Each structure stands twice: as structure tokens, then as C-alpha cells.
Image (cartoon, rainbow, N blue to C red):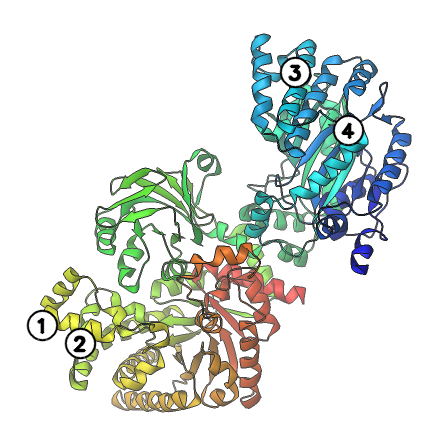
Amino acid sequence: MAKKKAAGASSKMVYYFGKTKTEGQGEGKQLLGGKGVNLAEMTRIGLPVPPGFTITTACCDSYYKNGKQLPKGLMDEVNEAVAILEKELDKKFGDDENPLLVSVRSGAAVSMPGMMNTILNLGLNDAATEGLAKATDNPRFAYDAYRRLINMYGDVVMGIDHEEFEHAFDKIKTKYKVDLDTDVPAEGLKELCEAYKAVFKKHGGEDFPQDPIHQLQLAIEAVFGSWNTERAVRYREIENIRGLLGTAVNVQSMVYGNMGDDSGTGVAFTRDPSSGQNKFFGEFLINAQGEDVVAGIRTPQPVIEMKKWNKAVHAELIAIKDKLESHYKDVQDIEFTIEKGKLYMLQTRDGKRTGIAAVKIAVDMVKEGLIDEKTAVLRIPAGDLTQCLLPSFIPAAKKKANVLATGLPASPGAAVGQLAFTAAEAKARAEAGESVLLIRKETSPEDVDGMHAAAGILTSTGGMTSHAAVVARGWGKCCVAGAGDVDINEKTKKITVNGKTYGVGDTLSLDGTSGEVMEGAVDRQEPKLGGDFGTVMEWADKYRTLGVRTNADTPEDSKRARAFGAEGIGLCRTEHMFFEGDRIGHMRAMILATTEEDRRKALAKLLPFQRKDFVGIFTAMKGLPVTVRLLDPPLHEFLPHEKAAQKEMAEALGISTAEVKKRAEQLHEMNPMLGHRGCRLSVTYPEILEMQVTAITEAAIACVNKKVDAKAEIMIPLVGTRAELSMLREKVEATIEATKAAKKFDGELDILIGTMIEIPRAALTADEVAQDADFFSFGTNDLTQMTFGYSRDDINTFLPDYLKQDILHGDPFQSLDTTGVGQLVEMGVKKGRSSKKGLKCGICGEHGGDPASIQFCHEVGLDYVSCSPFRVPIARLAAAQAALKK
């Protein structure tokens, strides 16, 4: 109880801003909300801000803790603030001669545009409206203000559907034979107020309140109530906004943009939030109130047109724009009203912007001397850099598109294509010159050819680290995963979404940045690198201490990653190499072999392919380290499971379909994640390890002979005990020496041998494991699966419920669980280095490209992170931000 009292009754609850006094200096957004802090600050620096007061976020917190009751004493403080406001403006709340009216707006510590409620013109009643009409000599304006209040109040406080008021308005417009709201005469608006009051009573069950203080109290409660509406809660979930007390309430004296053709209202950004150009960007409406601009009722004019309407106001607005940028050192999103030719500022906040704009604005502001390099580096959201690297939809074209469904934004980009339902179909049609989207319920390693060929990938199941998502990100391939509203019928080659059906001849567009699936072909634009982007990357490299490598499996990926600034390869997955061309046949022959001799024969045919791949990768990465992971997935993943494919395979290998089916059944495991895979394969089939190590060593020797500096690192996956690593390390070393002898090579190769820490036991016993390791690479995808007991492919079936109920604060496969899984990583680093000083440690799970996870990696002292090629710039910037924040 004492805690509640401290938050509610004894602490200051209301902070005034105006000429009389401006309170709250030193108080932050957590208490006063972003809007409240900035209203006070604009007042303090001399901008024309209508006076008012802010009710703290702590009151909102107390409101919910006290069973949705306002804190004791709050309305007393509100009444005191109203009295100061009345004195400053020489107006009276509810007066029938010169009434004071106020707006009531929400304002959380983090901007949540449009999520919570606003009420304008509060304080009007029947008598005050007549008084306002006389005081302004403008009855039309007075009744227009009153009808707006009844509508907003009915909607926000009473929950009356806006459409009920619209029906009444339509009748009035019909009666007076006008189309626009602004053309309804004063007598029509007066009739409309009576009609609105009737709607209010019919659907609200009571008369519209005539006591302005009562109106204000209920409006305050309504704003607090809007904090937990479904849309506000969902917005916070999407934006991962957590730990806030609630919303503040800003009560501000009204200024009127609807007093005639010399009045107006608008919103603007001090720079273009889409391109970042240093051009004033915004819109305004003449003879309107603020909500009209965002409601879409009328078409606003570009703010540049204001020069023609009122040159002096436009010049003042430009001067204020410059003053705000100079003061806040950032792009500002502003709201303003012009009342009878006089400009008033109603709001400023840091403007939201695209990734492309963020880069340009940061660089420009450094050039202009507004901020320094470090501030610029910290200001750009690292994840938003993706928008600079991949094709994107032209905003105007996307705005017109029909969004059919929304899934998970698994891999960014903008893909347009016709639908293909199998990997083979996608590959064949792509080779024939078509742009296709691969549509699958979920993908498997067997689909990689089709995935690689497709312009984009859409799955109806799977999460952010599903096979489709991980592979797509590695290739910079657009992917939308887990789009549950898309019903896929592979037999009929059709999908059904919201009752509409689409087939192979239909075109869809995928936005991998937002997860949207759109009908038809939406126009795109290509990115332009270098310039400002290159400047930001130079700054990032100057300040970061964490290395950045890439996850790459081909020479093409390696070259792309190096061009993006990768300092080596932290994960080369050899299993992906086995699916291309003739290789899969030899791989399957090896799996179906019943003797070691036959397995070795099949492996001997695979070896040249592996060697060629490694030569290409080492050459692309010359002088930089390349960590090659030995075979990791269970063998059954390389076998076909459909009858037709099994028959085709049997014919190719000259065996019976029954043999193929039998072997597939033998290899099938109930839980392959915990089964025969990783280092366990090398224990059972050491010949696989020998072939791969031989290919790596021969490739390194070939590179050395060509004067290419190859830095190979061999990584043994899924180790859980030191004994596994010790035994397999011996085999690796023996194979390296045997290969050198066979090739008559007596030079130094200096191939490192390490392990992937992805089993909790390996982290717990890292001091033992490290004695046989030259390096650790934390495979946090599997470490997360093992620690939580969650399948990364199935988590999306229950994750939304966990997030909604705050059981989890985010998807642990997207951003590292630092308190649980992170403890294992930190323990692994400390224990490993305790027994082997200077042990090189990195991370190669998908978390290696997540800015929040990179912050943690920096803090625990990892040497590097490794991520997909298109995430390398993100990781470089995030690593710099981690170093600067420290």
C-alpha cells in the first residue's frame, strides 16, 4: 500500500507549462511522456505553445493498480492547474461568455502514433457554445467545435461507434444539399449538434455532460483506459516496447484551425522521412482541426503550398523548424495550428524514418555540425540498414497494393513472381526465365535448388529461424514465413487466402521486411550503396572492437559478404554443398551403402566437388579465416520421402524402390534434433569426416600452391563431451597429415580445429572441452532449442500466446535470451578461457546479426559474431554501437 501511495498520493502528479511557469525541468519521458517533456521544452525555448499541463505516467500506473480509480488528490491538482490556465488566458472553464476549452491527449515515453485517444474542444456545453459564438462572432465555428466534441467524447469516453455520428451528419448534408463538411452552414451545424446529442443519449444511455470538470475527469480516465486497448497492446508487442508505467495525459488550451479561411492545421517533418533529403516535408488543411489531417476526410495540401496561402506563417514555420532541429539535434515530427493567421506549435517529437533516410540524415547532420560521428553511429537503428541493401517496393505503389495476408518478416527484400509449388518446378521455370515465388508449407534441405532459383519464398508454417528463414537470409533472398492465413494445396497447385484462390499463372508480391503478401506485381526500386552508406560503415569500423564474419556456403556468398565488409567466414555449412547437381546422387549412394567400402567409394566421388567448393571459398576469402563445419544434419534429410522421388532415386542407383524405402525408414528418427547427427555421425562413420577433412586440406594446399593465403578452420559440431572432441580431433589431425603426405606437401597449413558449442553440457564443461579446442563457436540456434526445449520450426504455434501474456518478452530465436541461454554463452567463454588462455570465441547462430544480441556478445567478450551476408553491415554498425554504449 505504501508503494501505491508514493506513486499516486504523495508525489507530484500534475506539471504545468506556460508563461506563468513551466515545471518539470529535469524530469524525463518516463514520467512526463515524450509529448509532455517536449511541450514543456518548446515553451522553455520560447516557441508559441498554447499553455497547459501534463498528468504523469505514474498516475496511469496507479489508475490500473487501484482498480481503474484515479489516484486520490489528482483532480484537486488538476483543478489547481485549470485555475492557473484560466488566469493566464483570462478565460473561464465552462463560461457562457468567454469559455476556456482544452484538448486532452495521450503521450507515452515512447511514441505510439495513433494508438491512443484524443479529445478536442473539451469544456463546451450548450451555454458555453453560445458564449463562444458571441465571443468570436463566429457561430459556425462554435457549433463546428461543439459537434466535434460530442463525436469525440462519445467515441472515446462512451464507446459509441463513429459511424452513428456519421449517419446523422449525412442527413444534414443531404438536407442542405452539400458534399463537404465545410460547406454546411451555421444553422445546419447547430441542428447537427442537437442530432449528435440524440445519438449520444440513444447509444450512451445518458445526456451529454454539461459540467466541464466532469467532462475532463472522464476524458482523463478514457486516455488512461486507451493504454490497454487491443490496438495499443498489439503495437507495443510489435515494436517490443516494454517496461513503461503507462501513458501521460496532456491537457492543453485549445487553439482553433477551424475559424475560417485564415486558419488551418498541419503536420510536418523537418526533413523528408522517406529519402532523408533536407527538405521541409508535410501537409496542412485550411479551416480544419488537427484530426482532419490524419482522418482522411479531406485531401491536405503540401506544406510548400502554404507560401501562397500565408507567406508570413510559412516563413515563421521554417524558422521554428530550424530552431527545433538545432535544439534537439534530430529530425522533428511536428504538429501545428494557425488561428486567424497566428501560428501555434502543438507537438514535436523525433521523427520516424526509413533506413535509407536514417543514413542520409545522420551523415548530413555530421557535415552540418549538428552532431558528431559517434552520435550519428548511435542514432541509426542497425536493423534498418537492411532497407539500404535490398530491393524495396516503391512506397506509393505499395500503398495502393491489396495486402492478402501477413506472415513473419523472415528475410528482407521485395520479391515479385508467379507461384511455383515444388523446388523442381521453381528451378525449371526460373531457368526458363520466369520470376517465381516458391510456395511451400515449409521447406527442407531438399528444396534448396528451388529456393535458390526462386525470387522469393512463402511458407505457411515455420518461424523466424526455420529452414526457409535461415537459408533465405543467408542468400539475401526475400522470405515471408509462417503466413498462417495462406492455405496451400500442393496437389492442385493452388493457394486460398480470404476466400480468393491463386494458381501457377498468378502473380504475388512479397515484402520480406514487413511480412506482407500482396496481390499482383508491385513496382520496386533498387538500392544504391556507397556514398553515405559507405561513410557510415567507415565510422562503424572505426569504433567497433568486435569482429564480424559471415555465414556462407558458396564462393558467390563469400564474395558478396566480403564486399559487405565481412572479415572471414564464421560458418560454412558443408551439407548445403551436397544438394547441387550430381552430388546428391553420390551422397544418397553413400547413405544407402551397407559396407564401409561402398561408402568410401561414394565419398570418393563427392570429394572433388567438396575440394572445388573449398578452393573457391578460400580464394574468395584469401587472407581471411574460413570456419568449415563438418557434416551436421541427420542422414535421412538427404533422402527423398515421396514415392515418386524414391522410385526415381532407385532407378538412378540401380536398386529397388523397396531398398530406398527401407533405408529411409531405418534412418527416420522420432526427434532428429536429439538423434544421430553432428559429431555423432563422425563417430559412427569416420570415413565421412576423413573425406571432408581431406577435401579441406587438399583445397588449402592447392591455394597455397597458387599463392593464395588460405586460413582454414575445421569445426566439429554438436560436441557434448571432451571425449568426443578429443577422439575426433585426433582423426582430423591424422587425416591432415596423411593428406599432406599423399600430396608431398611439407609446408605449413596451420589449420585450426575447434568446436561448435550448441549443447548445454558443452557450455557447462567448457573448461574440459577447451583443452582440445583451438576455438569455440557458439551455435545459439540449437543452444536455444536445447535450453528452452522449444523447436525453432514449431515455436510460432504458441509464441503469440506467450508474448501476449508476457511469459516471453520476444522470440528467443530472433534475439538471444541473455538471462538464460546467455548465461551458458558467458559461462562457456569464461570456463573455456580459464583452461586455455586467449581461446578464440565467436557466435555463428542467427543471433549474430541481431543488434541486441550483438550488444550482449560485445559485453561477454566474444572475439567475433558471424551472420548471413546481408546482415554483415548491420552487425558492423551494431558492434560499433555496442562499443560506444559501453
Say which element carries label 2. helix
Judging depth in this view, the residue of 520 and 700 nearest the camera is: 520
* Three-letter residue code for mark 1: Ile
Q: Quick one: label 1, few (<14), some, or many (20+) residues within 10 Å?
A: few
- For disc 2, the marked residue is 592
Say the numbered circle drawn on residue 356: none
Query: Circles 1 and 3: CB distance less than 8 Å?
Result: no
Q: Nearer the viewer, mark 3 or mark 4?
A: 3
**Label 2 crowding class (10 Å Cα cut-off): few <14, some 14-19, many 20+?**
many
Examine the rendering and report whether any part of residue 411 can be seen. Answer: no
Which mark lies nearer to you, 3 or 2? 3
Q: Is residue 385 above or below residue 273?
A: below
Instruction: Indicate the position of residue 614 as horizontal and vertical percent values.
Output: 32, 73
Q: Secondary structure at mark 1?
A: loop
Q: Position of residue 66 (x, y in %)?
A: 74, 51
Image: 350 above or below 723: above
* Residue named by callout 1: 655
Where does label 4 land, which residue?
254
Pick the quarter of the image with the N terminus. bottom right
Q: Amino acid at mark 2?
A: Leu
* Residue depicted at x 44% and y 33%: 400
Frontmost residue, 503 versus 282: 503
Residue 188: % across, % down: 66, 11
Q: CA distance from mark 1 to mark 3?
A: 85 Å
